Image (tube, rainbow, N blue to C red):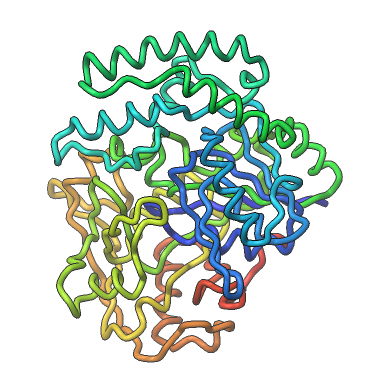
Amino acid sequence: MAKNVVVVGTQWGDEGKGKIVDWLTDRASGVVRFQGGHNAGHTLVVGDKVYKLNLVPSGIARAGITCYIGNGVVLDIHHLLSEIAQLEAGGIEVRSRLKISPGCPLVLPYHIALDRAREAAKSADKKIGTTGKGIGPTFEDKVARRALRVYDLFHPERFAEKLKENLEYYNFVLTHYLHAEAVDGEAVLKQTLLDAEQIRPMVTDVSAALNAAYKAGHNMLFEGAQGSLLDIDHGTYPFVTSSNCVAGQAAAGAGIGPGMLNYILGITKAYCTRVGGGPFPSELDIDTEGTPGWQMSTKGMEFGTVTGRKRRCGWFDVPALRRSAQINGVTGLCITKLDVLDGLTELKICTGYRKDGKMLAMLPIGSDEVAGCEPIFETLPGWSESTFGATSYAALPKAAQAYLARIETLCDIPIDIISTGPERSETILRRHPFD
């Protein structure tokens, strides 16, 4: 019988989902992206090759795996074609294995222009930290029912008419309100229709294909982008992304029933990071050499895959994980980057918060509420031995085992996988999600 596994980030993104999806793909027939856009960044290390992906699902690095982009993804087709070209230059066949939903809303140049102009107009304390790739405005168009979708591309007259209408609106906003340059409609139309012919062979009814695969007994992996605490509904709003990042979105964003989601794997760093603005209760100083935060930042190479921005770092946050576990229905955890903590003499775990004289066991809803939270820490001994590349739980230092066991106890979720490095082989398996 088929089994579908959903992989989601349980923190603020950048948890290492790409490597784990790639690693799990040896037991799957296909990998599905179901939300977000090319503001996501997944890095795969396969032997001596490094692949940086934004839209193409992480299963593409394994031959024979079919990859799907579901209707919940907003699609910049010009960027997608660039990404495909880079993968093909690295020897990976993409076009025959990539299937794109005709329902994907299109990210177009006016979305990018609006995104950047809006962020530039904000004061420093109001900036969201958007990637400037047009993702938010595209999701706005989707909800406002003026989005152009992949299926519009193959009706050029209809596409041109809708594009003209949208540009009249957006160019007015850009020039009169944001004092930015207008977007050239003719150039957008010409380039987009040229790109459309390249993706035409890849456009497929993804919903029908996934339902057929499930009935045929094929395992599927559903790959989330960003992290659950950036979810538009459940995250630290307004410092969030523009889509739902939780496991339940796999159903809506791919066109399947929720009963087809059988196991939810929560990817969790052994510490916490965050890119961009927004509250971060367990945040540490990352600039003072020799401090734990500095070690997390430098040893963990904490720079965004998409933006290159330095990630903020902090201690492991249990209340935040409890919130993620609740909104995702997490079945098991995968802990990543444990080796980054090697050499620290002591570790801290945030076990709760104090706010307005009250104790909180779970991350509150909304950034204003989270901003007032004071972390409560529990201290554990660190370890001097290296955990890098370990392939068995018994090989880990006793203090590392105790640290992981304490996380399991506090979060009440089993740790099924531990990633000890970027390579596929640098993984400890305790329970396989597909078993």
- Residue located at (51% from left, 35% from top): 76
Name the spot of residue 44 as percent of width and height, x first.
55, 63
- Residue located at (63% from left, 15% from top): 156
* Corner quadrant of residue 433: bottom right
Name the spot of residue 57 as percent of width and height, x first.
61, 50
Judge whether 219 appears above or below 405 on screen: above
Relative to residue 409, is residue 1 drawn left or right?
right
Confirm whether residue 65 shows in the render. Answer: yes
- Residue located at (69% from left, 47% from top): 67
Judge whether 83 appears above or below 435 on screen: above
Judge whether 96 appears above or below 123 on screen: below
Q: Residue furthest right?
A: 216
Please state which of residues 197 and 410 is positioned toward the viewer in this rendering: 197
Relative to residue 376, is residue 421 drawn left or right?
right
Relative to residue 208, is residue 321 drawn left or right?
left
* Corner quadrant of residue 216: top right
Relative to residue 46, is residue 122 drawn left or right?
left
Name the spot of residue 250 as percent of width and height, x first.
59, 40
